[in-house]
Structure formats: structure tokens, C-alpha cells
Image: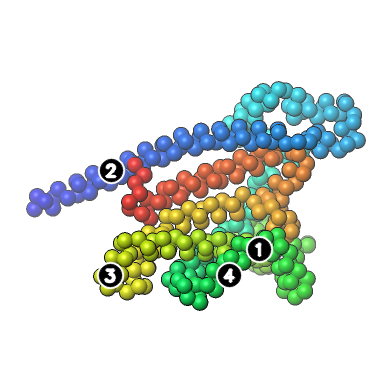
Amino acid sequence: MSQDSEQPEVTSSKGRRSYTGLVRYLARRLVTTVILLFGITVVTFALTNLVPGDPVAAALGQRSADDPAIVARFRAEYGLDDPLPTQYLNYLNRLIHLDFGRSWQTQRPVATDLKRAIPATMEIAIPAIVGAGVIGLMLGAVSAYRRGKITDQLLRLISLVGISVPTFWMAIVFLYLFYFKLGISPGAGRLSPGAPAPPRVTGMYTVDALLAGQWATFVDAAAHLALPTLVLTGYTVGLLTRFSRTAYLEVLNQDFTRTARAKGLPGRTVFFRYVLRAAAVPILTIVGLAFGSLLSGTVLVERIFSWPGLGSYAYQSASKLDLFAIMGVGLFVGVVYLCINLATDILYAFIDPRVKVG
């Protein structure tokens, strides 16, 4: 009787310790994240200002750049006359107020441009990583389970082709085949010419069209979304298949799996009950990095499909030496990877009980 009454106190005590450890871990990671964010601002500012070329000439054009009055007015407007340390401190002060500066290629705040570009990239990155995750991890499991057999060799060849073929070449081939030759896919862009964009809620046309009940717009946006998503999925599937296969095989060679097989457990039981869970931690890491790579913008794929996402915005900013836009993109990419690393570190504790966040 007394033992039963004491058990909830023990469980509650363990729960409190676990919760306290998680809070402490999150606090430490938050401090580390702030320090890393500061480092990212230093790196992006330094690299942007070390890029060879004259940003004034790139922004104004050669004729206007030859006029000293226009150049002086431009440099004063964007604070380019100040010493670099002063420019950096001004940049930090604006960042505290969530002001990324003003782009001189669009004449809009960089934050406004990012709000337009990021959802477009997310619209192809999210389905690409979901599809690649499901297909790639499944193929990697099949390849590892059928190690050394014809199925394994075929899947290894397919994954090798997937990661070896350049994404821009695959995008060109898909666009030529499915749009130009077969005519079963719409052209580049997010919507067909003349098609109205749905009311903006998330910035992702398929989601916004569903929320507004515009079914024709949803079908059109989904059709335009198919090819770029397929290209990115194909490359990511190859990457995840090869990496997950390696992770599965590494676990299969460990002592506890050999012991399970020696006890007479069927191979499928050992694989699905023990191997998949033990290999989840390194697989989660590569999935997070792949998702971060997709979210940070796939420049060539977006340019080929005329997709106005973060990759296209980064390319246009670099070609015009748009300093504030380049720094805004660099800062966003850094934040994406910091958030993904934090999320994967926290998930480790839930996937593998041997990992303690406290």
C-alpha cells in the first residue's frame, strides 16, 4: 500500500528533473544561438563588403556612376560614406529593430522582399523534403536489408545517378521533355499568364488557393509546382538513400543486432524493431541538413523555372551587388541552419533514450 502511494512521487520527481534538464539545455542553446547569430552578422557583413566590384556602379549603371553628384547622393542615402565599423554598428542597430535595410535593386525593404521570396521557396522545399524523406529512407532500408543482392546493387546505382546528375541539367531536361515535347506540364513560373494570384495568407499559392476555395488556381499552382519539386526530390532521394543505407548497415554490424539474430529473432524483426530506431539519429541529421539546403534556396533550379524564390532573389542581389539584400539572404540562411540544428538536437532525446539534453 505504501509502495503504491510513493510511486507517483517518484515518477513526478523524474518528470521534474527531465523538464528542468530540458529547460537548462534550451537556455544554453539559446545563449549559444545568440552568439552564433552575432558571428553570422560579422561574417556576412565582412564577406559582402570584401566582394570585388563597385556596388555603386552596379546599382546606378556606368553612366550615372560617372556623375559625382549622383554617386555622392547615393552613398549618403545608404550610409556607404561611413567607415566600415560604423556601417556595421548601424547595421546591427537596424537588425535589433528587424530592419534589414533597403534593397537598391527593388527599392523596397529587404524584409519585404524576403517575405515574398521565402514562401515561394518553402512551397517547393517542403514537398520535396517530405517526398524525398519517405522514398529515400524506404529505399535505403530496402537496400540495406537486401545487402549484396541485385536489389541493393540496383538501388545503389539509382542513388548514385541521382546525386551525380546536376540539378540544373535535370531541370532543363524535365522542362524540355514534359513542357516542350510532351506538353503535359505548364511552363515556368508559379501561375499561368493571366491567372489571378490567390489572396495572400501564407504566400504559398497552393495553400492560399485552398484557403480561399479557388480550386482552379490551386490546380494551376500545383501543376507549376510539380516539375521543380520533382527535380529537387530526385536529387535529395539519391542523397538520403545512400546515407540511410550506410547508417542502417553500421547498426546491423553492431553487437546488439548480432545478439538479437543469435537469439533466433527473424531478420525483419531485428531490422524494424532495433535497426531503424538506432539509425534514426544520424539519419535525422542528414535530413535536417538537406531541408536546410532546400530552404536556403536552390539558385539554378529556381532560375530555370522562373521561380521567384530565395535562390532567384539571391542571384539577382549578387549580380547587382545589392549589399543589404545579400546580407539579408545570408542572415536568413544562417538562422535556418541554427533552427534546424536546434530542432534536431532536441529530437535526439525523444528518438534515442541514451541521449540526454540535460
Instruction: From the image, tell me which residue sits under label 2.
Output: 16
Which residue is rendered at x = 34% and y = 71% of the image?
A: 269
Real-space CA distance between mark 1 and mark 2, rounded to the nearest whole angstrom = 51 Å
Helix, strand, or loop for circle 3?
Answer: helix
Tell me, yes or no, whether the two marked residues, 1 and 2, touch with CB atoms within 8 Å.
Answer: no
Provide the residue designation for mark 4: 158
- Counting residues from the start of the chain, the first of labels 4 and 1 encountered is 4
Circle 3 residue = 262
Which residue type carries mark 4? Ile
The 10 Å Cα crowd at callout 1, few under 14, some 14 to 19, many 20 or more, is: few
Q: Is residue 254 rendered to the left or right of residue 317?
A: left
Q: How is the image coloured?
A: rainbow
Residue at the location (32% across, 43% down)? 19
Tell me the amino acid under the disc marked 3: Ala
Circles 4 and 1, Cβ within 8 Å, touching? The answer is: no
State yes or no: discs 2 and 4 in contact (Cβ < 8 Å): no
Q: Nearer the viewer, residue 227 or 155?
A: 155
Which mark sits nearer the N-terminus, 3 or 4?
A: 4
Q: Which numbered disc covers residue 165? A: 1
Instruction: Look at the numbered disc 1 and give the secondary structure of its residue.
Output: loop
- N-terminal of the pair, mark 2 or mark 4, is 2
Residue neighbourhood size for the residue with mark 2, other residues' Cα within 10 Å, grouped as few (<14), some (14–19), many (≥20): few
Q: Say whether residue 151 is visible.
A: yes
| Dot placed on the residue nearer the N-terminal end, 2 or 3 | 2
**Residue at image location 41% in from the left, 37% down from the top:** 27
For the residues marked 1 and 3, what is the alpha-carbon distance in whole angstroms? 42 Å
Mark toward the viewer: 2 or 3: 3
Which amino acid type is marked by label 1? Val
Q: Earlier in the sequence, mark 1 or mark 3?
A: 1
